[in-house]
Image: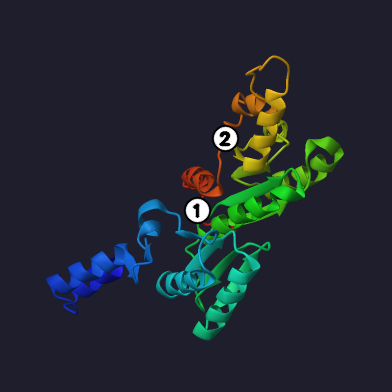
Amino acid sequence: MKNVLHRLLAGELNLEEAEAELRRVQLQDLGGRARLDIGRTARRGLPEVVLAAGKSAADVAQLAVTLAADQGQACLSRLSPEQLEAVEAAVAAAGLRTLMYGAAAARVLRPGFEPAPGGGRVAVITAGTSDLPTAEEVRMLAEACGHQARLEADIGVAGLHRLLGPLAELVAWDPDVVVVAAGMDGVLPGVVAGLVEQPVVLLDRAHGREHRQRRRRGCGGGSHRRPRGRRQAKTTSASEATISSSSAPALTRITQRLKSAPPGRP
């Protein structure tokens, strides 16, 4: 958008051409099959993420290449092996590169592109390995926004001794926020919140909610009590733990908190 305005002031564009360019900046139509919101980063501070689930491999590949060529990067989530193969072929043909986050998330990058430094640090913890795909999406979005991210996996409270060492290392790294991806280990965010001073964001996994709901329905007489772990997370005053059903809303809250992070931290 700034580039269009500079070109208008320099006389490279007339008013009508500048208006057309600004419209294109906000929305790009791909043959009637998709409309890329390429102005989202400027409006929201978060890049658009292509949800691959339910899309054809060819469409995902086209979206990835178009976004990366225009914006410098494209974030992709929930990729199937077939979709990933198509993306990698299209990326190679376009002279771009792919950075993987686990097996199902990726960033497609234009050569030489680096996001503007955000200055924040995001620590990500998973209760179990089944929470890794969602945690990797958090790490991907944090790095796409120019923040540093570190991930520690499989440190749920079923073996509490596994948590303390990795958590101590993360605290020594001095993060601005701690994201806890916990599917069936609803107590973990509360434990973490009691051990750190940083705000804690609970990234609640869908399979974990379903499991806890089934357990609740099976607990005598149709009791409607909420799971103990979730109640503990929501009442933690020290960390304002937040319930979320997907990584993008969680990252919106994280980005808002990171805006107050000290600039230029190494």
Badge 1: residue crowd in 10 Å (few <14, some 14–19, many ≥20) = few
Badge 2: residue crowd in 10 Å (few <14, some 14–19, many ≥20) = some
- The kind of secondary structure element at disc 2 is loop
Which x, y percent locates residue 96? 53, 79
Which x, y percent locates residue 63? 45, 69
Left-right relation of 13 to 171: left
Give the vertical position of 154 relative to 34 (above or below): above
Which x, y percent locates residue 217? 68, 24
Quarter of the picture holding the N terminus = bottom left
Give the vertical position of 172 relative to 54 (above or below): above
Question: Could you say which is closer to the camera, residue 240 or residue 176?
Answer: 240
Please name the amino acid that badge 1 sits on.
Pro
- The kind of secondary structure element at disc 1 is loop
Left-right relation of 173 to 142: right
Tell me which numbered mark, 2 or 1, is placed earlier along the sequence.
2
Which x, y percent locates residue 7? 23, 75
Residue 243 circle label: 2
Residue 263 circle label: 1
Give the vertical position of 119 relative to 224 (above or below): below
Report the residue at 18% width, 67% height from top. Answer: 19
Measure how far apart labels 2 and 1 are at the Cα level: 28 Å
The number of numbered badges drawn on the structure is: 2
Give the vertical position of 220 relative to 85 (above or below): above
